[in-house]
Image (spheres, grey):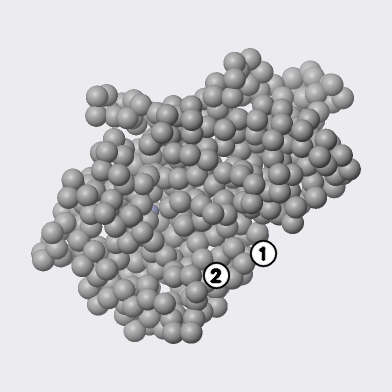
Amino acid sequence: MTLYRATVVDTPANPFTEEPAAALRVEQDGAVLVRDGVIAARGPYAEVRASYPDEPVEHLTEGLLLPGFVDTHVHYPQVRAMGGLGRPLLDWLHQYALPEEARLAEVSYADAVAVQFLDHLARAGTTSALVFGAHFAPAMDTFFTRAEASGLNITAGLVLGDRLLRDELHTTPERALAESHELIRRWHGRGRLQYAVTPRFSLSSTDALLEVCTELMRPIAGGEAVPVRFTSHINENTAEVAAVAALFPGARDYLDSYDRHGLVTDRSVFAHNVHASDLELTRMAEAGAWAAHCPTSNSALGSGLFPLRRHVEHGVGVALGSDVGAGTGMFVGKEGLQAYFMQQLLGAAGLPLTPVHLLYLATSAGAHALGRQERTGDLSVGKDFDAVWLCPPPGSELATNLAVADDAVDALARVFALGGPADVAQVYAAGRPLHTRRASDDAATRARSGRSESGDSHRPTASHEPTQD
Ligand SMILES: [Zn+2]
């Protein structure tokens, strides 16, 4: 067992339905006791220490210990396709993203991308993700192999499309069914992995292919105990919405192109939903489907300003996604800040967000969207120890600001305003340390800022300091 001493901050309740102050839980000088990767006790450090006087202690006493971030929409094949600014969605896809996705036909390339992708997730403090996969089954096999080894909580699936992409990305309904079933048998429910049926979007999916998705959502006889999940894109861009309407003349709206195949359920997460109608929001709420809000992507592609207030008023759950590569990096905290900006810019139509809302959107909400709220999303006793220790390098703007923060809410506001992957000092996935910012980096920063090593240690004083990096 290990005892982590830290300022522990999480959101075990929903600030959109309760008072934000009641949704936040803060342990100023707190402790989290971890046994076999699971949180066994938590509370004020003095109390927990008194109960467990012999356990080793890791002092994470500067910065904040938060639940690991949950990214509900991020593309594994696009990790090398970030930064394509200046294009709207469909142009960006064809000029920028899809050519890179086609390269994953080669397994060795896909494997190298998978390793980079999972490493970047961990370095960004993300411990759970709903990952948009590749169009190639061998690329998904190598991805799941790497994901299992990473210890991260990963839900993903083979991406399906049978029209309007690039020829080499197209599948057939028969092939989609066979390859997906094989991947589900092999990977769904194994360790921390779940499978998500993933048509790219209805624009690139015939009704025959969407019917295959319906089939895949049914439990396999004698197969998995937990049903697979579903994700796709929706209502991202007005040109895309118009194209889908033309392709599905019998559908009531974009959501209905999925709904009439039974794909709108409480296991469904739809990315974007920027241009949702009231009818669509009503139907999503009724089904318990979630929206993955990806504000840096929506901003970079000029897709639009997300109607968060309307989602909340209709009762549709919303979590955050980085949507890399259209998004501008994997740090979910940045998505929180951009979500905040968007609501400010919407004026009266916007929903003002507090730092508590941002933490909820970046952690607990995503755990619910993935159906993993019993295991992750906050740091309650009985859950997996999925956590990120945010502790900025000495001399950084965030360090300067955290040092004068009034309280945990003020500190959270400064983390969302100023934080980035460089402030991720340590990440734990089910108790396993995944990413440790190199001590040499901190030493170099200290040297530049003229601070001493001994008087300002930001390293955990651990009895088993992790070495993986
Ligand atoms: Zn996307």
Q: Position of residue 182 (x, y in %)?
A: 48, 81
Residue at 57% in and 37% down: 10
How packed is label 1: few (under 14 Cα within 10 Å), some, or many (20 or more)? few
| Image: 24 above or below 84 | above
State the separation of the CA atoms marked 1 and 2: 14 Å
Contact between labelled residues 2 and 1, with CB atoms less than 8 Å apart: no
- Tell me, yes or no, if residue 256 can be seen here: yes
Instruction: Name the secondary structure under disc 2.
Output: loop
Instruction: Name the secondary structure under disc 1.
Output: helix
Q: Position of residue 295 (x, y in %)?
A: 38, 39
N-term mark: 1 or 2: 1
Residue at 59% in and 24% down: 408
Q: Nearer the viewer, mark 1 or mark 2?
A: 2
Q: Is mark 1 within 8 Å of ligand 1?
A: no
Mark seen at residue 189: 2
Q: Which residue is mark 1?
A: 149
Q: Is residue 454 left or right of residue 66?
A: right
Q: Is residue 219 left or right of residue 211?
A: right
Q: Quadrant of residue 419?
A: top right
- Count how many numbered circles sit on residues in the image: 2
Q: Position of residue 112 (x, y in %)?
A: 60, 63
How packed is label 2: few (under 14 Cα within 10 Å), some, or many (20 or more)? some
Residue at 37% in and 76% down: 218
Given residues 33 and 59, the one toward you in this image is 33
Could you tell me the amino acid type at mark 2? Gly
Q: In the orientation shown, which residue stands out farthest toward the left? A: 249
Could you tell me the amino acid type at mark 1? Ala
